[in-house]
Structure formats: C-alpha cells, structure tokens
Image (tube, coloured by chain):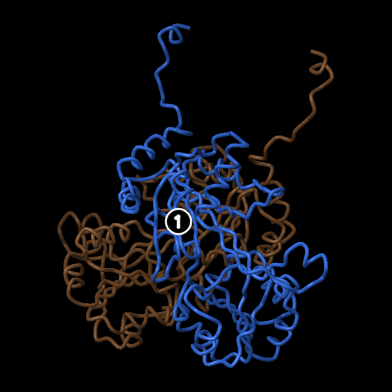
Chain colours: A brown, B blue
Amino acid sequence: MLYLIGLGLAYPSDITVRGLEKVKQSKKVYLEHYTSILMNASLEELCEFYGKDEVILADREMVEGGCEEMIEASLTEDVSFLVVGDVFGATTHTDLILRCKQRNVPFEVIHNASVMNAAGACGLQLYNFGQTISMVFFTETWKPDSWYNKVLENRKIGLHTLVLLDIKVKEQSIENMARGRLIYEPPRYMSIQQCCEQLLEIEEIRGEKAYTKDTPCVAISRLGSDKQAFKSGTIEQLASYDSGEPLHTLVILGRQTHDLELDYILEFADDKENLTEMLRKDQEYFKPLPWVPPSEDEMSD
Amino acid sequence: MLYLIGLGLAYPSDITVRGLEKVKQSKKVYLEHYTSILMNASLEELCEFYGKDEVILADREMVEGGCEEMIEASLTEDVSFLVVGDVFGATTHTDLILRCKQRNVPFEVIHNASVMNAAGACGLQLYNFGQTISMVFFTETWKPDSWYNKVLENRKIGLHTLVLLDIKVKEQSIENMARGRLIYEPPRYMSIQQCCEQLLEIEEIRGEKAYTKDTPCVAISRLGSDKQAFKSGTIEQLASYDSGEPLHTLVILGRQTHDLELDYILEFADDKENLTEMLRKDQEYFKPLPWVPPSEDEMSD
C-alpha cells in the first residue's frame, strides 16, 4: 500500500494523527523535497518524530522520473510518500497516482492543510479567489509572464489572485549542468520584495493595467508557523518590504473585497488610511459601468 | 488562549497531532456544528478520542451571536473551538477572530484540510479553479441564482467551479419558527442529483448558456472518508446519479482542462468515449476566436 500523506505547513506535529499512524507502520518513508519545505523541522527532527532511522528525500528527478522503486515496493509493503502541504498541490503527484492505478498499486491519500486553503488566514475569503499563479525567478534573459493574463482575467471579474513564489532546492547552475557536475546551488526562496519588483517590471512592459503599482496586496510569510506574519500594502509599498525568512505567498486583491475582508487586512497595514484610499481607487478598475436610463432623445426614437 | 482548530474531513484521527495536544490541554472544547459535519464520527466518539467528558456543540445562533461566553473564558483559560475542515472556510469564523483581536484575547489557528483544497483529489488542478459557489435548497418560491453569473464568469475564462452543496442542520420549519417552538427538522444534505437538477432549472430560466446540460462535471462524495467516491458525467447524466450518503461536492469543468486532468477524471466516467466527446464539445464554448490574417481587401485599404 502506498500512503500519500500531506504534512501541513510548518511543524512535524502538523501531520494528522491518522497520517502519523501510517508513517509509523510504513517500511519505507519518502519525503518529496523540491516543491516546498517544512519550515519548522529538520530531516533529523522528522526521523525522530516518526521513530524512523531514515526518511528518503525524493527530489525532482526521482518524482518526475516516475518513482519506479517506490511504486514497486508499495506492491508488497506499506510505503509512505510525504508531501509538504497537501498531496494535490503539484501536478506531478496526480501523475504518480495515475501510475499507481495503472499498476494496480493500492493507495490511500491522507489530506492536510496547504497554502491553497490556509491562505484564508490573511482574512480574504477563499471563495473570492480566482486561478492561482506561480512567479518564477527572472533571469536577465528569461522573464516568463504567462501569469499576467491570468491576473488580468481574475481582476476583470473582481477576484483575488494567489501568487505562489518560486523556490529552488537542489538546482544546478547552467555551467555545472553542462559539465555534468553534480554540484547543487544553495536553496533560494523568493521574497515578497522580489515578487513585487517582478510584478512591476512586467506591468511596465505589458502596460495593459492588469494591476497598477497602487493595487493592494497582502503578503503572507511563514504561514502556519510561530513566525507567521502578514503585511498589507500596495505592490509598490511591498516592493520595499523586508519579508524576512521564507516561505512567502502574495495575494493580489480583486475588486470584490468585502468590508469584513477590508477590516481584517487593514490590521496588517502600516498606514490604514492610505491603504483604504488605494483600495477604493483600485476598485474603480474593471468596474462594470452603472446602468443609466436611456436619454429622452433615445426614448423618442 | 483560544485555539481555533481545523478537524479535517472525516475521521476523529484527521485532527493534527498538534491540534490534538491543544484540545487535550483545553478546559472547554466547542465544536462548530452547522456549516459541516465530520462524516466518520459521532459526538461520543469525539469525546472519547479527545479524552473529554464534554464537547459543547456550537450552533448558528451561538456563533453568529458572537460566542461571548467562549471568548470570555479564553481570557483566563485554554479553550478550543473546533471546525470541520479548516477554520477559514466560513466568513463567521474570520469575524470571530476579529472579535478576539478587539478584545485582546490571544488566539492560535491550527490548520487542516478542507474541501477547498482536498477537492484536488478528483484529479482537477486546484490552480485552475475560479471562484467557489454555494448551492442552497430551492423552495417553491425561493430559487436564488446569484451563483449563475459566477459560473459564467469562471467559464468565460476557462476555469473550473467548485460547488458547495447546502446542508441544513438544526433548522426550524417556518411554522415552528413563527410559533416560537424550539423543534428542529431532521438534518438535510443536498445530493448531487438535486444540485444538478437545480443547475438545469436555472439554465432553463436564464438561458445565457453559462453551461449546458452536456457540460462535464465531477461529483465528489464523502471526500476523505473510507466511502469516498467520484463520478464524472454531464450535468444531465449526474442529475440521475444516485450519490448515496452525504457529504457531496460538485465541480463544473471549465475549458482549460488539461490532458492529465482528463485522463484522471475519465477513470470515473460510465462512458469514457461519450464524456470525451462532451468535453471537446463543451470546450468550444467561450473559446477565444482564432486569429485570422486580414483579408486582401482589408490589406489594400
């Protein structure tokens, strides 16, 4: 049996009681280790918490390569595949389940919180979110902006946009990759500042006003940990905000911001009056035109 | 301290290890008991699992009335407020946290899976979902359809729509309410069938083709429990599908359905060929027009 188990957001003890039972009874335990990290736990702490000698790190090569060995083992014994957050955050895990089905490997999913639902902690209502986007690290020559249209689409219908910030774990430099050297760069986690700078950079290029420098956002840092922090401000303001240690997530507000949501996010603003004004101003974008009765001229036609 | 703790979806053991610690150390434990239910547990089983003599049921009156007593108690002792799924599913809990802040009541949120992220188990990618809608029980005279525009907006930009199905727990009949009799109706949970019938009924009235009877959907039943079931089909097909015991959720597909998503949901279809055809047909709706080069006439202008 293959147990696919969500670990939640921060602590070893964020695993569910049922999840922990399954880990303990598993012969082999894998930890998916490239789409996210568990903020408040080292690998040693996890091993100790699970009462295991070993937790095998599953990197991108292993997971995208099909996890053959893991699937094979699951045919004859209990195996756990641990994912930070929930199991269905990343496409590749859906693919893994499909392969289990094809191979008749029995599997069970044990869910947990992920940023996709826990982001509600910033006070914005989950049912007002549109499609989610990912912001990758730009380079001098590579600045992908396919997310721009998605923000525009969300904001046209008044919805908030969750922005997932890039992380680079166990990545090779282009030089090392070219030379086949298995040397990995130190892990990198995008900051709120960099994300907002990239947002401004692309708006400058595209100029379609999917958002402006004054569009209100909420920065979510270290969600679910003891160092969790929120900061509300405009994109421009957050482009000079020091968000501290990772992980971070950003929400770009949509027009449909209710008063209760506003009350909540104002608590996280440096200047409440300014943010309220920016929000009112931003709500004018994409606003449906008010209905006006036809003029007398038109009536007489 | 007030601990707001998500319980996850089905089993008493779906609570996190950290959540369970906090419940055990709490003097008073409340269970929010009107926006959802824990499928695989009775109140007695919960008490036993937590090692508590009592778990106080918090009904709509109590929560929307402000939970004065609970907040007051949290000033001097540890209190747990348990919510099926995650804490930020329902607006009223954000409101509760705002009141804690105003009263300087220390609080901590312990997240868990909710339908908002665990719905990914049906194989559709969470980042392709638009705004979430709620479907309430229609009556002869009351058929609210404000959700219709939201489905239309989502589908115009190709996104999936998560439909939360109404539940009625501890509701009074109009007659009993009028006479001030504290007699409550048996609990009711909307079935997939009824939800789809109501979808068809409103499309019949509105006629704006937000969706058609042939629009593909995925029915999610008893998510996260041992009786979890998925069924893919068109709205018309699912309007005669017996979805069994509650709870249920529906996803209306959007045009942006990827091949991996399709592979996954076809596993849950009675007739794969038919559903593939319906999906291809449905993808023609709201499709951006293909770019055509200007005609020679236009060129010569």
Q: Quadrant of the N terminus of chain B?
A: bottom right
**Residue drawn at 28 percent across, 75 percent down:** A80
Residue A154 vs A223, above or below: the answer is above
Tell me the residue that label 1 is attached to.
Answer: B242
Q: Nearer the viewer, residue A204 or B200?
A: B200
The local secondary structure at tag 1 comes to loop
Q: Nearer the viewer, residue A230 or B275?
A: B275
Left or right of residue B299, residue A186 in this image: left
Left or right of residue A113, residue B63 in this image: right
**Residue drawn at 60 percent across, 86 percent down:** B55
Left or right of residue A188, residue A52 in this image: left
Q: Position of residue A69 (x, y in %)?
A: 16, 68
Q: Which quarter of the figure has residue A2?
A: bottom left
Q: Nearer the viewer, residue B87 or B211?
A: B211
Q: Nearer the viewer, residue A176 or B234?
A: B234
Label 1 is found on which chain of the structure?
A: B
Residue B259 vs B2, above or below: the answer is above
Q: Which quarter of the figure has residue A15?
A: bottom left
Amino acid type, residue under disc 1 in the picture: Asp
**Residue drawn at 51 percent across, 82 percent down:** B19
Q: Position of residue B200 (x, y in %)?
A: 55, 42
Q: Position of residue B40 (x, y in %)?
A: 47, 76
Q: How many marks?
A: 1
Left or right of residue A296, residue A249 in this image: left
Q: Residues within 10 Å of mark 1 (few under 14, many from 20)?
A: few
Residue B248 vs B106, above or below: the answer is above
